[in-house]
Each structure stands twice: as C-alpha cells, then as structure tokens.
Amino acid sequence: MARWLPRSTDLTRFCQKLNRVKTLEDDMMETSFNRCLSTIDLTLLGIGGMVGSGLYVLTGTVAKEIAGPAVIVSFIIAGFASLLAALCYAEFGARVPKTGSAYMFTYVSVGEIWAFLIGWNVLLEYMIGGAAVARAWSGYLDSIFNHKIKNFTETHVGAWQVPFLARYPDFLAAAILLVATAFISFGAKVSSWLNHVFSAISMGVILFILIMGFVLAQPKNWSTQEGGFAPYGLSGIMAGTATCFYAFVGFDVIAASSEEARNPQRAVPRAIAFSLGLATGAYILVSVVLTLMVPWHTLDPDSALADAFYRRGYAWAGFLVAAGSICAMNTVLLSNLFSLPRIVYAMAEDGLFFQVFSRVHPCTQVPVVGIVVFGLLMALLALIFDLEALVQFLSIGTLLAYTFVAASIIVLRFQQQKGDVPAPGPSGQPSAEPHEGPSGGELKEYESFSDKLHLVERDKSKEQREPGQLKAAFEPYLEFLSDFYPGEVVTVAVVTLMVSAICLCSILVFGNTHLHLPTWSYSLLLVLFSLGFLLSLLLIWAHEQQHSTQTFQIPLVPLSPALSIILNIYLMLKLSYMTWLRFAIWLLLGLLVYFGYGIWHSKENLREPRAQRVSARYVVFPGGSLEERVQAVQPSSQPATGLPDTDSEDCKR
C-alpha cells in the first residue's frame, strides 16, 4: 500500500507549485492596453466607485438606527481605516503597474493559489455589487414614478414566490447594465469620459446639498433635548464605523486601471489619496448637514436627504437629490463593469482562468470578451435573483482582499529586489563577481547549491545589508536567525502575525457571546494572542527592508499593514455565519476551477527550471587557504568535450 502514497519529493514539488509567485517582465510599462488615463481620470474613477448610493442612503440609516449625529465620528474612523488599506494598494499600484488589483499584488508576493482565490472572490464581489446597484438604481427611479414600473411588471409578467429569486423580474435593472456594458466596450477613454459626466453632475448635487444644508442648519438638533450628539455612546459609534467602512469600498478600481495609466508610478498613489480624501470629506460633511437640518431620530432611512429638504419646505430640492443619486449609482455601475473584466483578463493572461478572456480587441484595446460575458451575467443576476441575502458577500470578499494585500506589502518590502541576485554569465553560469572585502581583498561568489544561499563574508558592523536580512543591531541577540535566507524569517513571522490576529479577534468577537469564556481565561487568551501579534511585529521590524525605490511607499511598515490586517479580520468575523457558509461554498467551486484548469495552464509552468546547470556556490574568503575547482556543467545537448584551460584552473585566494 505504501507504493500508492506520494513521495516526499512529489509533495514538496506540489506545494512549490501552489506557492509559486508570478515572474514580472523587465519592462512593466509594456502592455496591450491603451495607456491613456491621467491622474484626474483615475481620481474620478475612484470617486465614482466610492461615492454612490451610500451617500444618499447610508448616512441616514446609520444616523437614525446606529450612531445618531456621531455618525460623523464613525465616518472619520472608517475613513482612517480605509486609508490603511488604500495606502497598501497605492504602493503596489505604483510598483506593479499591471491590471489585476489584489489578485496581481498577491500573485507577485505570496503565491499562486492564494492569488487565484483572491481573484475568484473579487470576481463574484464585483458581479453581485454591480447587480445590486442596478436593482437599487431601478428601485430609486421607480419610486420617483410612484412604483408604476413595479406594478406594471407584476400585473403583466407576474410575481414569483421562489427562494433566492426576486419577487418580480427587474427588466429596468438588466437594461441599464446592458447599456453600461456597451459603453464600457468602446474603450477606456469612452468609459472615463462617461464617468466624468456622471461624476460632475453628482459632485454638483453634493455641493448644492452642502450649501443649502448649512443655510438650513439648526444647531439645536444636536442638543440634549434631541438626544445629544452621541445618543448610542461609544458602542454605537464603533458599530456605525463597521457599517460606514463599506462606503469606501471602490478605490481598488484605481489599482485595477494602473495598466491603462500614462504614468502609474505617480498617478496611482495620487489618485487614491485624492479620491479617498474627497470621498471621506463628502461623507462627513453630508452627515453634518443632514443631522443639523432635522432631528436625527426623525430621519427617513430610505431617502433621508430628499425627506429632509421636503420637511424644511424645499420639495423641489428632492428632484435634484434624486438626480444626484441616480448619477452616483451610474458611476458605481461603470466602476464595477470597468474593473471586473480587467481582473478576469489578468487571471486568463496568467493561464489561471480560461484563455478566451485574455483576448484584447485590437481597436478599442479592452478585454471585450470579458466585458460582454460578465456584463450579461451581471444583467442576469439583476434580472431574476434576490440580491439582498448576498449583499454581505461583498464585505467578506473585499475584506479578504484587503487582508492579503496588506500581508503582501510586508512580504514584498522585506524581499530582495530583482537586481540583488547575481546575473548569469555568458556561458549560462552565474558570474563570479568580485566584492571588496574588509581588508581590501576580493571576495568571489559562485552559484549556490540550494539556489537560495547568498553568502558574502563582510564586516557586519559596516556592511550595507540586503532587504530581509537581520539588522546589525539585533544580531548579537538573534544570531541564530542570521543563517536563514533573506526574507524567510519575515514570511514565517507574517503567517504567525495573521494567525495571532485571527485568534485575538475570535476571542474579542466570540469570547463572551458564543464561547462563554470565564473572565480569567478570556483575559489570559487576549494577553497571549496579543503578545504573539506584537512579537511577530517586532520580529519583522528587526529585519532590513527596501528603502531605495523611486515609487511611493506606505509609511510605518510593518505597523500600518499590520493594523489593516487586524481590523479587516475583526470586521470579517463580525459577519453572519450564513455569509461564511456561502463563502466556503464559493471557495470550493474556485478550488475545483483551479485544480481542474488553472494549475495545469499556469504560465509559470513554462518558467520552471527543468535542470540545474550549477551544483553549488562557494564563497572564498580573503586570506584563507580554501581552494576550489570550478567545473563548468555542459548542456545535455552537447558532447562532454574538454574545457579550455582557463575554465579548469584552480581559483586560489
């Protein structure tokens, strides 16, 4: 029976396949897309993705039911939390200006299977998000006409009472998605222009709301007679923060568009910063005027802004608010339809998804097959499915992507850069490059046995250490870590940090409610997992990281990504168990696609080395008595002829 068991070498090779990372081209600016988007284009795309129906609906809902006027504080905290994730996207978008967003960032730093699962989840997230916004758009327009469209459809088509299906087919939602799909297919410039139009109208309406709102503001609506500024206390503010956090989902469209940016190294970080700042400012200011115009406890959660103007005697302003809301929802639709086909294109281009989706139209220079297919699927979802039960799925996919991107930032920052590894010599052998020793002698370096060792003896107190190596100041205390390959200890520490964060957040969320832990064990576990998280963070910080780069870098690494990781995990664990169940089913389907297709067609298969041409790398130290004979390895296609004398001499120092 033992012969049927896989050998350890086969298991090792299989695990290496799962965790192989994407090899980036030398010229990352080369693309089949049209690099035509400026910083303004990207900024407006980001604003369109974030400032949607949430500005007109979410503010009133959170203010009345969760936080009161303190919804302002909730948006401030949520904006800061989103900034941590956005900065991670900004650094990756500048360093890796390729389409694919979180999928691509995970692929180049963490590994293939993790990247596929992130892309697989983001794919469903965009489809459900676009379909849900289309139904909201349809419902909002229908409410303006006193639900005549709904009544007509139910009368002449019929109503359904089937689980997971909508009460009636929403032809208007499907139609708007098909129209948007047609416009997106015309190219990035047309999509950007259309987004400019809707964003300009939306921002004009927001400006009108702010001006009129401050004119009609009544400070007494924050007084104690009306319940005060924070009627639900700190718990209400934090609960509101968890809800408001999802209002800022959408800035990743900028990272997904980086392959179509003219100057992504500068445009992507600036566009993310500008769009997130403007979106945060809009949410905060609209929340201020809304809760000052009318008492917070009298707000209508479904149409808070329009109702507030109506009650103050400006019914005509409700039509402007409705127009702004519809335009804002149009920008979100365009954002979803713009990003989704590009992520699918990136997966197909790497061989992990069906190759047909990697086709780019020669004229419009967009992945037209992906746009049409997923536009039709999105329209089908909006037409017949009940999306309310699936909307929470958006949250878990987004938060998981944020978590992996933050972890990828830490891993990539502490990895050696591509140029740090000696280049091969003309004969296929890595060149033995001389290095200056501390005593003035030369060091000669040859190819390593494990293809991981990179040893050069230097004066450790004065050397310029490579990324991923232990800092000189910590070497006397952590000398046993200096034997590892640069970056290996950091990778293990990142995994430990994420496990500690999951355990810590699980105790915080479920410790008192579901697990019913005694106080002493609850406190002990919190302390233990907090120590694990902090020690992992300190261990990462004790290593050198990349500093010499010409692109944007997120400050305070590894602290900033670590805070983003623990926040995202906490919010994921707050979601319902049904969301996790659906998430697990979708992951299983994704694994079937990956192991049935992706792992066999991955382009990294073609790049895997078939044979090692060099067996070992040795370092010869100055003043030593070590002698080494360098024997070149002949290619298998050539006869084993004699070598020139210069290649068979002893290398002595």
Image (cartoon, rainbow, N blue to C red):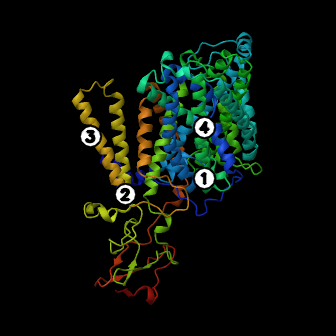
Mark 1 residue type = Lys
Mark 4 against mark 2, which lies toward the viewer? 4
576 or 324, which lies in front? 324
- Mark 2 highlights which residue? 488
* N-term-proximal mark, 1 vs 4: 1
Q: Please state the total of marks drawn on the protein image.
A: 4
Q: Provide residue 427's location: percent of width, then percent of height.
A: 51, 78
Disc 2/disc 1 C-alpha distance (Å): 26 Å
* Above or below, comparing residue 261 to residue 451 in the picture: above
Q: Provide residue 207's location: percent of width, then percent of height.
A: 68, 33
Mark 1 against mark 4, which lies toward the viewer? 4
Disc 3/disc 4 C-alpha distance (Å): 38 Å
* N-term-proximal mark, 3 vs 2: 2
Disc 4/disc 2 C-alpha distance (Å): 39 Å
* Above or below, comparing residue 311 to residue 535 in the picture: above
Residue 263 occupies quadrant: bottom right
* N-term-proximal mark, 3 vs 1: 1
Asked whether the viewer can see residue 185, the reply is: no
Q: Is mark 2 on a helix, strand or loop?
A: helix
Mark 3 against mark 4, which lies toward the viewer? 4
166 or 71, which lies in front? 71
